[in-house]
């Protein structure tokens, strides 16, 4: 009965998925206005498709995705953000934002020149990145602000020019944070590793925020069974390892008191096979058993002759 129920449930799920797929549509984007309209009008299952690269002039044309699940397929084009030095840097200023109950699958796109971040998963929002390249964003590549990021294939250039004068230029790949403005007690940032992360920069590919606006109490990392790179717990830091368990990148230290949940990093240990003694050949064995037989005989004969000569000499002296 349980098996029948299982297959019945599976059939219903597949059937329902098929219905959703039938109603899903592709929404073409040609400029910032159509990008804005597509994000606003898309419903669960829809795909926003870039037909060419676009440049955004303000946050108004990059609305937050909430309450639905959509895909943004860049088709290998670029979305260039905006830089408004006089504008507010306090509110959401990311090119693509998954907000509360929002799920965004981002693929095949370059994101650059954002006012703050290229991608943000905010307040329980979920974003996946597949064949995504992010560079030259003002604050960082990705802001994991009490949301979830699934990494399938992510490439990072330099991000995070740190314009507020807090220590000069600082690379910031994926920033892990929980804003003090969030009141949801279960809002914990998390990363799902399901592929690869590559970066032109070595430092702060994962960066744990520690400023006054951060209220992070926990961080969760999950590595799928099929992932190539992993994010692992290494004391108070996170390390990104490759398929051979070699460390590619290491984060800064997580602030004291933050609970880090994930798989622990175990360094590779070089195991050398024990060296077995070589089995001596028959020739070597014979040499060991009968060391230099001919030389021994000559030595024996020489000593014997010397002995006889000594006896003869002594005998002559006694009888003279």
Image: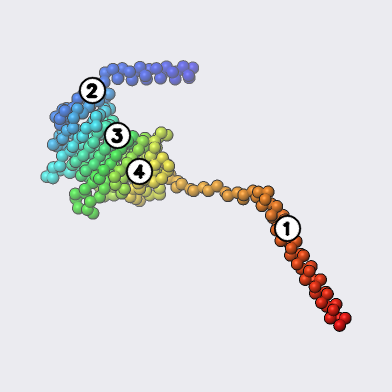
- Image height of 83 relative to 62, above or below: below
Question: Is residue 78 shown to the viewer in this render?
Answer: yes
x then y, percent, for residue 23: 26, 18
Residue 216 found in image quarter: top left
Sooner in the amino-acid sequence: mark 3 or mark 1:
3
Q: What residue sits right under mark 2 in the picture? A: 26
Sooner in the amino-acid sequence: mark 1 or mark 4:
4
Callout 2: few (<14), some (14-19), or many (20+) C-alpha neighbours within 10 Å? some
Sooner in the amino-acid sequence: mark 3 or mark 4:
3
x then y, percent, for residue 296: 73, 61
x then y, percent, for residue 224: 40, 35
Point 48% across, 19% down: residue: 2
The disc at residue 293 is 1
Callout 3: helix, strand or loop? strand
Residue contact at pointers 3 and 4, CB within 8 angstroms = no
Image quadrant for the C terminus?
bottom right
Q: CA distance from mark 3 to mark 4?
A: 28 Å
Q: What residue sits right under mark 4 in the picture? A: 218
x then y, percent, for residue 156: 28, 41
Q: What residue sits right under mark 3 in the picture? A: 131
């Amino acid at each position: 009965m349980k098996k029948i129920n299982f297959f019945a449930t599976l059939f219903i799920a597949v059937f329902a998925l098929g219905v959703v797929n039938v109603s899903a549509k592709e929404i073409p984007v040609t400029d910032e206005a159509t990008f804005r309209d597509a994000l606003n009008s898309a419903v669960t299952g829809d795909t926003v498709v870039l037909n060419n690269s676009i440049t955004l002039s303000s946050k108004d044309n990059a609305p937050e995705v909430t309450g639905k699940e959509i895909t943004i397929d860049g088709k290998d084009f670029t979305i260039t953000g905006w830089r408004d030095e006089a504008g507010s840097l306090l509110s959401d200023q990311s090119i693509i934002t998954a907000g509360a109950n929002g799920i965004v699958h981002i693929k095949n796109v370059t994101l650059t020149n954002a006012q703050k971040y290229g991608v943000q998963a905010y307040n329980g929002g979920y974003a996946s990145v597949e064949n995504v390249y992010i560079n030259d964003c003002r604050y960082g590549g990705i802001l994991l602000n009490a949301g979830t990021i699934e990494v399938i294939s992510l490439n990072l250039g330099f991000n995070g020019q740190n314009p507020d004068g807090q220590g000069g230029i600082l690379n910031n790949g994926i920033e892990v944070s929980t804003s003090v403005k969030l009141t949801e007690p279960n809002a914990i940032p998390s990363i799902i590793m399901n592929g690869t992360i590559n970066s032109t920069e070595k430092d702060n590919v994962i960066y744990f925020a520690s400023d006054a606006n951060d209220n992070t109490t926990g961080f969760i990392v999950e590595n799928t069974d099929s992932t190539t790179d992993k994010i692992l717990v290494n004391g108070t830091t996170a390390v990104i390892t490759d398929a051979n368990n070699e460390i590619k990148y290491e984060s800064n230290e997580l602030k004291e008191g933050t609970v880090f949940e994930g798989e622990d990093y175990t360094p590779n240990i070089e195991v050398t096979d024990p060296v077995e003694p070589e089995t001596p050949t028959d020739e070597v064995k014979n040499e060991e058993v009968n060391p230099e037989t001919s030389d021994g005989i000559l030595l024996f004969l020489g000593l014997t002759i010397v002995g006889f000569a000594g006896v003869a000499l002594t005998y002559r002296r006694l009888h003279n």
